[in-house]
Image: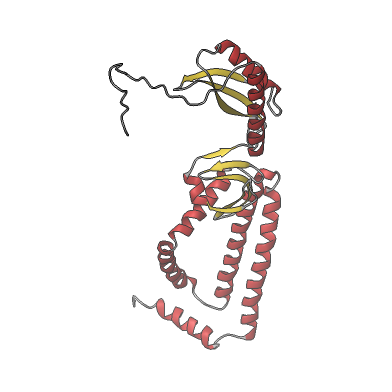
Amino acid sequence: MQPYATVEPDLEQLGQVLNGTGLTLWDYITAAAIVVLSLVAGRVARMVVKRVIRRSPADTFLGDLIGRLVNYLVVAFGLVYGLETLGIAIGPILGALGIVGIALAFAFQDILENFVAGIILQLQRPFTGGDEIVTGDHQGTIVSVDARTITMRTPDGEVVHIPSAEVVKNPILNYSQRGPLRTTVEVGVAYGTNLDTATGVALEATRRASGVENNPEPRVFVESFDASSISLAVKFWHTPTIASRWETRDQVMRSIDQAFVDNDISIPFPQRVLHLDVDTDKPAELPIA
């Protein structure tokens, strides 16, 4: 038995296809029809899979991904079957493509990393279209998720395309998945202020502020003794959106400021106390920085 006997027919068949010998017009028509049908079948399969999976908004991006993969598989099967119809052995071609694929994998590591990260995000689904999230240095509303990037619209109206790998590597804060969010505002009162009175006034002012949720109720705590004031931590709940956080925070701070003015509670400026050791027989000398 000759060890290379199986290679000769493959090369001979490939040469016949390239030269057009040994094949009839019907062979070419059949191969072309198989490829065209696979393209059509792949597109139809993609639409069917997307419809089956996209039963809820949360499955939109996952349906797109699986539908696209099914489309690729159907088309690949059609190409292989079409080549076999022309008498081309697929084994050697796939081997060559495997070697090329390994080289391309090293050349496009970042693209492959983002592709895999995109699949992970669409399978785990830490967010979906319309959710407001914060990840890394970006915050905004999710517009779309594809195999490589996350498209987000920021509160300033800008559209940002974030690589999927970057999102996977960073913490994801999703404002939209659960109920109300809690925000904390710190406010300082002067030393000597009655803390029971100050916390009570701040609490009532927070309750009156627009956008503050009554359940859970807001709370006010004495936070710390600072250099010039005693810090109070005002904690309140609001609608889970980025815009609501800003608007409710603004209303709470305005309400507390007015309530402190009405109750003669001062918010002190930073202060420094200097103690000078002055000799009555000598003029005072101050150190020069």
Residue 61 in view (yes/no): yes
x and y percentages locating residue 170 in the rendered image? 48, 43
What residue is shown at x 31% (from left), y 23% (from top)? 283
* In the image, residue 248 above or below residue 83: above
What residue is shown at x 59% (from left), y 41% (from top)? 133
Q: Nearer the viewer, residue 91 or 46?
A: 46
Query: In this rendering, would 67 be left or right of 120?
Result: right
Q: Nearer the viewer, residue 210 or 28?
A: 210
Name the quadrant containing residue 200. Answer: top right
Figure quadrant of the C terminus: top left
x and y percentages locating residue 141 in the rendered image? 63, 45
Name the quadrant containing residue 36. Answer: bottom right
Q: Nearer the viewer, residue 230 or 240?
A: 230
* In the image, residue 97 above or below residue 178: below
Residue 216 in view (yes/no): no
What residue is shown at x 44% (from left), y 72% (from top)? 92
x and y percentages locating residue 226 in the rendered image? 45, 22
x and y percentages locating residue 230 in the rendered image? 50, 19
Figure quadrant of the N terminus: bottom left
* In the image, residue 130 above or below residue 288: below
Name the quadrant containing residue 275. Answer: top left
* In the image, residue 71 above or below residue 249: below
**Number of on-image labels:** 0
What residue is shown at x 67% (from left), y 18% (from top)? 262
Q: Residue furthest front?
A: 281
